[in-house]
Amino acid sequence: MSDKASTRPDRWWAMLPAARWLGQYRWSWLGPDAVAGITLAAYAIPVSMAYATLAGLPPQTGIYGYLIGGLFYALLGSSRHLAIGPTSAISLLVGVTVATMAGGDAARFAAIAGLTALLVGAMCLLAWLLRLSALVNFISETVLVGFKAGAALTIALTQLPKLFGVPGGGEHFIERVVHLAGQLGELNLVVLAFGLAAIVLLVAGNRLLPGRPVALAVVVLAISVMSMTALQERGVTIVGALPEGLPSLTLPSLRPRDVDGILPLAFAVFLLAYIEGVSAARALAERNGYKIDARQELLGLGAANIAASFGQGYPVAGGLSQSAVNEKAGAKSPLALVFASATLALCLLFLTSLLRNLPNVMLAAIVLVAVAGLIDVKQFRELWRINRLEFWVAMAALLGVLALGILKGVMLAALFSMLLLIARAARPHVAFLGRIPGTRHYSDLERHPENERIPATIIFRVEAGLVYFNVDHVHEVVMRHVQAESAPPRVVIADLSNVPIVDLAGARMLAALHGELMKAGASLRIVEAHAKVRDMLRAADVERLVGPIGRRYTVDEVIREIEAGV
């Protein structure tokens, strides 16, 4: 067999994590995985129904997402604990955006939601093929802190009318606040009391019994109360009958060109789903002593969303809350997701009638408790204490979501992260160095004013790559420092030890700097450049102008030459 043929199974093995973990599976894990799967299903039933209503879809749609998405992620995902299903932010993003596309047609609404999941899956697969897993690193944690808080406030405002027993209304955050304030006179105290009691039980249960299906227990209690009382006559509405049976597998009836604006929605969901899922998977992996494959997560998430689209679902992702339930319930492997899917299938086949009397305010209470964790006040305080600029960046993301809506808020968060990255790269720190007393080492004079200044010599170190969008800044900083010296320098030393890359614009800037310094009676010396940087400087003819830039040429060697009068 040829080498090429022999490596083919290895490639398929790498793409199919289930083949690896099943091969290493221990029988002692079967019990914990089964318990974790059943516990996850018990958690998922009420939560997924609540999120589906948040997305504007029938409650059972959320269960379909957990049932189908979890199975395919177990096959292709790299995390042992990540649980796949609808999440609050994605549900609201789908709900508020698809509503304008569907025009009040429920069938079209469901078809657009399914098509969105299909496109999200396709984007994941394309990103996997193009090895774009590093995409997650371009959305800063600071921006995510603000975005999550803004999304939580937006989601909460959509649920407060249900909690108060009023119709609500409005498309944007401020409009919803105004509508809700105007309807407070119609507040239904019975509905409010029921919802507040549910919230208290959910919060207390989550604190006292972490990792347990508290929501299901409260749902059972709520259904029992509705079944034994006449609260429907007091305005407490119920979910009603859910369809029995498993979802039929069909391709979404619409095509992307049939729906205006669906590509931006799918891209926003893709960004949010991948960032949310990888962040949760990494946190769980670090806590349990293993690593995830960020690129493989694209394949797992893509397969889960494509499968969900065929199974009458809508976009799914890996959420931290459901994954924490899975982990704390004792999951040892992704087989727990298979047990969860099997449990959900049995519930859809035989137990849907038990959910008929589930009050809608109960679903609102579940959503409100879930999204409260997205507002991380401690993180905002830390940002304020450590870096005020980062704090205002987070606030800008928060206000952007509230002012522009969650779809534009996702796009704004991504754009803001990129602009922040570019802004920082465009103005890199340029350190001017002095000799550490009693040594032959050199460090930043600004941070260590006790360092010795070398007579008639300026030493600068650029702490970033020298590329087209920052070379003007570096040139300006260096020349301003040269002109500010009381005595004109004879030598300017460019320490490139912290410069990983120099493009053509960077090389030309160094050549231009050399020319300006020559006119002022000084020379430029370049030291400690890395191999690729040296290659570029030689190709751009900079070495011929400034002298040797060999890999062993250091700041101290140039200083020794100056001091020796060479």
Image: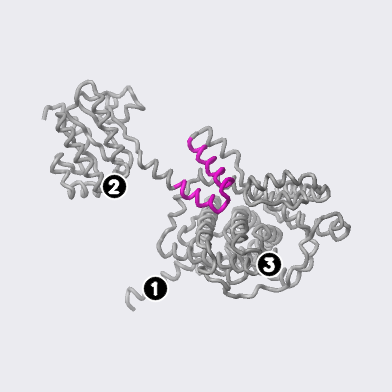
Circle 3 residue: 344
Circle 2 residue: 501
Task: Look at 75% across and 72% down and name the residue there.
Answer: 350
| Amino acid bearing label 1 | Arg
| Amino acid bearing label 2 | Ile
Of badges 2 and 1, nearer the viewer stands 2
Circle 1 residue: 8
Say few, some or many: other residues with alpha carbon within 10 Å of mark 1 (under 14 / 14 to 19 / 20 or more): few
Task: Look at 31% across and 34% down and name the residue there.
Answer: 430
Residue 310 rendering spot, x and y as whole percentages = 58, 72
Task: Look at 34% across and 36% down and name the residue there.
Answer: 429
| Magenta-drawn segment | 389-417
Of badges 3 and 2, nearer the viewer stands 2
Residue 187 rendering spot, x and y as whole percentages = 79, 47
Residue 69 seen from this side: no
Distance Cα–Cα, label 3 vs label 1: 36 Å
- Taking the image as shown, residue 511 lies to the left or right of residue 243, namely left
Q: Residue furthest bottom?
A: 1
Of badges 3 and 1, nearer the viewer stands 3
| Amino acid bearing label 3 | Leu
Distance Cα–Cα, label 3 vs label 2: 53 Å
- Taking the image as shown, residue 18 lies to the left or right of residue 313, namely left
Distance Cα–Cα, label 2 vs label 1: 36 Å
The first of marks 3 and 2 along the sequence is 3
The rendered magenta stretch, by its main secondary structure, is classed as: helix
Task: Look at 65% across and 49% down and name the residue there.
Answer: 371
